[in-house]
Amino acid sequence: MFNFRSPSFKKLGLDRENMGDQEMVDLMMKEPRLIRRPVVEIGRKVHFGADRKTLEDLLDA
């Protein structure tokens, strides 16, 4: 769910390979733009960053 392609992440200049889970959670709490969007809950599953086609497929399933 962490958006490594976000301009906000790129500005931080961090190495994604060396980031721990807690560090990513802390960064998302400080900067919500680091969370992949949209966040969609369908049934009991949560999907992050799905494009329109993927969402349509999920809704049709």
Image (cartoon, helix red, strand yellow):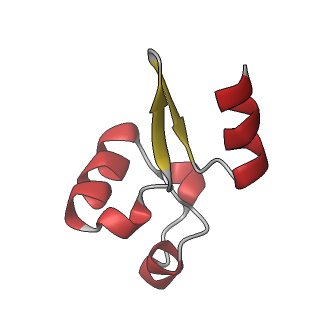
Q: Position of residue 44 (x, y in %)?
A: 44, 15
Left or right: 21 as drawn, with respect to 47 = left
Using the image, determine if residue 61 lies above or below residue 24: above
Q: Is residue 29 toward the left or the right of residue 11 in the image?
A: left
Seen as rendered, the residue at the extreme top is 44
Q: Is residue 32 above or below residue 61?
A: below
Residue sitting nearer the eye, 42 or 26: 42
User: Which quadrant would the C terminus be assigned to in this image?
Assistant: top right
Viewer-proximal residue, 37 or 29? Answer: 37
Name the residue at 53% across, 59% down.
Answer: 3
Q: Residue furthest front?
A: 60
Residue at the (28%, 68%) spot, across then down: 31
> Residue 52: x percent and y percent?
71, 53
40 or 60, which is in the foreground? Answer: 60
Query: Would residue 10 be found to the left or right of residue 33 on screen?
Result: right
Residue at 59% in and 51% down: 49
Q: Quadrant of residue 54?
A: top right
Task: Identify the residue at horizontal 48%, vertical 51% (top origin).
Answer: 2
Count of marks overlaid on the render = 0
**Which residue is most to the bottom?**
11
- Can you give x and y, in whole percent of width and height, for residue 5 in the image? 61, 68
Residue 50, given in percent of the width and then of the height, sits at 64, 47
Q: Compare residues 6 and 51 and report the one nearer the observer.
A: 51
The relative height of residue 47 versus residue 32 in the rendered view (above or below) is above
